[in-house]
Every structure is written in C-alpha cells, then in structure tokens.
Image (cartoon, coloured by chain):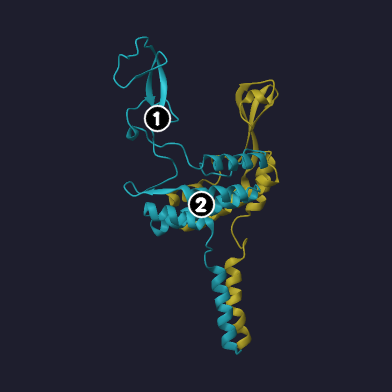
Chain colours: A yellow, B cyan
Amino acid sequence: MTTTRLLWAPWIVAAALVLPGCGGPDLQSYCDDRESCLNGNSADVDACVASFKGQRDVASDIGCGDEFDTYYDCVIGKASCRSVNTGMACQTSDQCLSADVTCSGGQCVSKTYDIDSDQCAAETHAWNHCEG
Amino acid sequence: MNANTFTRAALLGAMVALLPSCSQESKVCSLICDCTHCNDYANDVLCDELSTESDVASAYGCDTEWGDWLTCIQDQGSCNDTTATFEVTAPGSCTGTTSTGVACPTGTCPTTGWTCVSGQCMMRTCQGSAQTCTMDSECTGGVSYCDHESQKLNDCLDHASDRHAPYFKLDL
C-alpha cells in the first residue's frame, strides 16, 4: 500500500461512520407521507425525521438496531393514510374536542397513518421481543 | 513534515470528529446519570433520548427555548442522595391555606390545626395543591423551578407545529 493510500484511509473510515443516511429505512419519505396525511407542516416533517432517527439510535443502543430497521422497512412500504370515524356527531371541527380530529359529513373523523394489524406481523413481533 | 506526521494528523482529526461532543445535552445527561447511578447502557439511552429531543426542538426552530430549559435544569436541578433521584422541583411546603367553610365568630376553631382568620376556620394545605397537611414532609414535590422555561418551550413548539409538536416526547 502506498503512502498516499495510507493518508486517505483514516478519513474514509471517519466519513463512513459520520455521514448520515447510509442505510436504514427511508425515514424522510415515510415522514413526508405521514405528515401529508396528518396535516403537519414542514417543521413537523423535519421533527418526524429527527424523532425517528433518534429512536433508531436508541434501538441501536439496546442492541435492536436491525429489528428497528426491518420493522420500519416493512411499515414504510405498507403504511397508508386512513380516516377513522370516532362515532361522535358534529357540525364543526371545534366540537370534536381535539385538534387532530376534524368534522366531516357530520361525524368527527380522526386520521391515522398506519398499517393493518395483520401486516408486518413477524417484524412487529421481532421488534417487540427485542425491546423487551 | 513526513508521511507519518500526515497520517497521525489525519487519524487525530478523525478521532476528534468521532468523539462525543461536550454539549449541554451530554452535561445534563451526566448530571442525571451521576445522580441516579445509571449503568453505561442506561447512560447511552438517556443521552440519545436527550439528543433526539434537542434535534426535534431544533426542527421546530426552538433551539433558544430548549437551551434555556437545559440551562435551568443544570442550574436548578439537584440530586437527592437518599433516593438517588434528580429533582428540579422545590421541596414540598405546607404553607398554603384553604377555608374549611366553618365560621369562628369567637376566634377559636373546633379542630386542632385549624386557625381562625377573619371569622373563618382555615386549614393548612401543601403549596400549590389542595392536599391538606400539618408539616412540610407531608407535601411531596413542590413547584418546578423550570416551569417558566418549560412553558416557553411548549409555547414555541406549539406555535411552530400544525399538530401540537407530537414528536417532542419529553414530559416537561
């Protein structure tokens, strides 16, 4: 190995460790879709990405980084925007008693960005089991 | 300067870049963990959680308010060595009063511990709550020293988010 290669080696290793976004679930795309569904703004999207990146760090701390990635890789491909009727009648959104719930067609409707309960079952089980 | 010196400089630069920064979050993390005797594992989790909250606050443009809150925690927090808990609340204080609804026209009250004030029997309560008490030790958890900073941070987060800042998880 030449001296020039030796000089670059530590920097390449450091860059690989420090650079964000190398591997892992596509959290940016997930948060864009999630906040678009839930009526969040651009700050909510940025906060969403920061929050999930942090959760990934904590998952790694406790030895569950792989399970986190596998779970969210599955969720990101399957999550969709859903409207859930809360069963409360309304005329205006103020009557729905929560900022996240809106009045639609005379009913309070809550939005969620989620997967079906039978989707990602193995990944959910592995993630829960690892987390303890 | 020879190639060896270059290599050492490069390695040193890489190490400095990788070392954990001495941020306010890590200082607060150390304060709490030193007090509560965290193991390394819990220390890493707590530090990462604080760092995440910092990033979320930053995403909402609330760095100043977050910094002020952390400063307050650093300045006002104290360790209760007996219980190994990090506290940011004033000790409970049995200095509040509330009316019993019993009149005392003669200046005396029928129950020990009640006092007659302006013709009304008053009983003592923990400061800031309705819990009755006779001494300070009966009052748990007083007012948080960082309430003002918590409120300003909450206001900032709420103002910036269209959804009440759902990603900020810290219970202020």
Q: Is residue A64 visible?
A: no
Measured along the vertical axis of the image, is residue B101 above or below residue B162?
Answer: above
Picture coordinates of residue A107 (x, y %)? Answer: 66, 23
Residue at image location 64% in from the left, 41% down from the top: A80
Residue appearing at x 58%, y 75% in the figure:
B13
The chain under label 1 reads B
Q: Are marks 1 and 2 in contact (CB under 8 Å)?
A: no
Check the residue under mark 2 and report the chain it is in. B
Amino acid at pointer 2: Glu
Q: Quadrant of residue B17?
A: bottom right
**Location of the N terminus of chain B (image quadrant):** bottom right
User: Share a chain, discs 1 and 2?
Assistant: yes
Check disc 1 and report the residue beneath it.
B95
Query: Residue B124: x percent and y percent?
Result: 37, 25
Q: Dot 1: what SS?
A: loop
| Residue furthest to the bottom | B2
Task: Answer with left or right where residue B171 lies relative to residue B87.
Answer: right
Tell me which corner region of the image, top left, top right, bottom left or bottom right, holds residue A40: top right
The residue carrying mark 2 is: B49
A3 or B47, which is in the foreground?
A: B47
Residue A75 or residue A51, whichever sits in front: A51
- Spot occupied by residue B27 in the image (x, y as percentages of width and height): 48, 57
Which disc number belongs to residue B168?
none
Q: Position of residue B75 (x, y in %)?
A: 48, 50
